[in-house]
Image: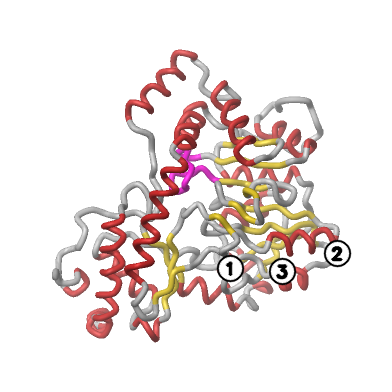
């Protein structure tokens, strides 16, 4: 067996293994799609491919309206404005920072809420306790190819008379409570970044069953509006290009096979990690049908022998490009750690997860054998934890 790289050996893998999906169409399919765009000479601004994508996604999600955008962050900003949110919105501290930045861009104050230690989604009781007269909405996140406590949050929002919407960047194709994500709350926002299971290389969409919200979004998306004119607070340039739409449509054709590929990789990780003390895979709720977009683990330092960050350092030396996800909690990130210091305490579950979670490689550049080898490598690192700690302390 090769010596561990962190102890002076050569990296176990010859090239970096990224955590993102990086599923792309074959060159011949890509070339044909791009040639079609150039022949039509229609490159952006709701072209034919963009319209086809919206219609296809509407059927896929089972919702009335899908509004595609150039990226999910702009989608979240537009969502906050389209919902006419004001004052404060409750948001998890355990989320991607763009979720919270979208509120800041929209002139809304985020109120950070703790998450459930098992589901990693907003804790309903904590949400309810934070609602006051200034709170106009709840922005919840569906993580890891699973779903948060959607039904409980919907009951709270209805009872309190506030709006509920979802950052479902991780949730394309996920099914919860017997139906696909996309039609819950006022709206849901999805990401088509290259690291996601459905890729447009960059892009996203907003799903809603509300005609008025959809009309606002379409008028806000372009700098001069689109569709029947409605009053909107601002316009933007969030138009998806025809090239993005072409790649998204090809990715949609490959979706089921890519999900199955990820499922097999996740199962290989599960087998390889099963008997390693201090390592546990994050499991999606059994009531959900996952898209297997992520393989996420928790580290118990006392049982494993290394901290999460020590383990990640050792894995990166082996060219396994693992990530802390999310780190730090948004409530401890600039500028929110200063501007919202009153919210920087009281999120113990968020702080614990930020210190223990990490994401393993999965997707196009990984296979079952590689996943198995990474799992076995993690076991080897645990067995040599004492020597590794000694080397790191020098």
- Mark with earlier residue (3, 1): 1
In the rendering, at what x and y percent does residue 93 appear? 61, 66
240 w.r.t. 13: above or below: above
What mark, if any, has residue 119 been given in the picture?
1
Q: Residue at x 52, y 18 (%)?
A: 42
28 w.r.t. 170: above or below: above
Structural distance between the alpha carbons of marks 3 and 2: 18 Å
Secondary structure under the numbered disc 1 in the rendered image: loop
Question: Is residue 86 or residue 287 the one in the foreground?
Answer: 287
Label 2 crowding class (10 Å Cα cut-off): few <14, some 14-19, many 20+? few
Find out whether the residues at labels 3 and 1 contact each other: C-beta distance under 8 Å: no
- Mark with earlier residue (3, 2): 3
In the image, is 189 to the left or to the right of 153?
Answer: left
Structural distance between the alpha carbons of marks 3 and 1: 12 Å
What mark, if any, has residue 133 been given in the picture?
2
What mark, if any, has residue 124 been given in the picture?
3
Q: Nearer the observer, disc 3 or disc 2?
A: 3
Dominant secondary structure, magenta: loop
Q: Please state, as top left, top right, bottom left or bottom right, where the N terminus lies in the image.
A: bottom left
In the rendering, at what x and y percent does residue 155 appear? 79, 62
- Mark with earlier residue (2, 1): 1
Label 3 crowding class (10 Å Cα cut-off): few <14, some 14-19, many 20+? many
In the image, is 219 to the left or to the right of 97?
Answer: right
What mark, if any, has residue 46 been given in the picture?
none
65 w.r.t. 39: above or below: below
Q: Nearer the observer, disc 2 or disc 1?
A: 1
Magenta region includes residue 192: yes
In the rendering, at what x and y percent does residue 18 appear? 34, 54
Secondary structure under the numbered disc 2 in the rendered image: loop
Query: The magenta stretch spans which residues?
Result: 191-202
Q: Residue at x 45, y 13 (%)?
A: 39
């Amino acid at each position: 067996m090769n010596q561990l790289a962190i102890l002076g050996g050569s990296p176990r893998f010859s090239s970096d293994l990224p955590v993102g999906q990086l599923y792309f169409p074959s060159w011949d399919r890509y070339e044909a799609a791009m040639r079609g765009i150039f022949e039509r000479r229609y490159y952006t601004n709701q072209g034919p491919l963009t319209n086809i994508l919206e219609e296809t996604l509407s059927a896929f999600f089972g919702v009335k309206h899908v509004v595609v955008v150039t990226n999910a962050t702009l989608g979240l900003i537009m969502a906050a404005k389209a919902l006419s949110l004001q004052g404060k919105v409750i948001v998890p501290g355990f989320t991607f920072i763009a979720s919270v930045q979208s509120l800041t861009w929209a002139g809304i104050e985020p109120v950070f809420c703790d998450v459930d230690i098992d589901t990693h989604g907003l804790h309903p009781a904590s949400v309810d306790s934070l609602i006051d007269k200034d709170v106009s909405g709840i922005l919840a996140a569906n993580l890891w190819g699973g779903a948060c406590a959607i039904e409980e949050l919907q009951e709270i929002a209805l009872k309190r008379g506030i709006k509920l919407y979802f950052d479902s960047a991780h949730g394309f194709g996920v099914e919860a409570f017997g139906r696909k994500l996309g039609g819950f709350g006022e709206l849901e926002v999805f990401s088509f970044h290259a690291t996601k299971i459905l890729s447009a290389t960059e892009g996203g969409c907003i799903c809603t069953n509300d005609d008025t919200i959809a009309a606002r979004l379409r008028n806000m998306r372009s700098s001069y509006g689109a569709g029947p004119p409605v009053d909107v607070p601002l316009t933007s340039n969030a138009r998806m290009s025809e090239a993005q739409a072409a790649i998204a449509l090809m990715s949609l054709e490959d979706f089921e096979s890519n999900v199955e590929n990820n499922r097999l990789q996740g199962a290989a990780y599960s087998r390889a990690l099963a008997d390693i003390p201090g390592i546990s895979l994050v499991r999606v709720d059994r009531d959900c049908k996952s898209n297997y977009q992520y393989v996420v683990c928790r580290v118990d330092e006392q049982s494993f022998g290394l901290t999460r960050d020590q383990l990640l350092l050792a894995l990166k030396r082996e060219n396994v490009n693992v990530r802390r996800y999310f780190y730090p909690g948004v409530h401890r990130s600039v500028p929110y750690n200063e501007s919202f210091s009153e919210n920087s305490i009281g999120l113990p579950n968020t702080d614990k997860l930020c210190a223990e979670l990490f994401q393993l490689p999965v997707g196009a550049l990984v296979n079952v054998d590689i996943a198995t080898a990474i799992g076995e490598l993690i076991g080897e690192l645990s067995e040599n934890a004492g020597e590794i700690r000694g080397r790191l302390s020098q």
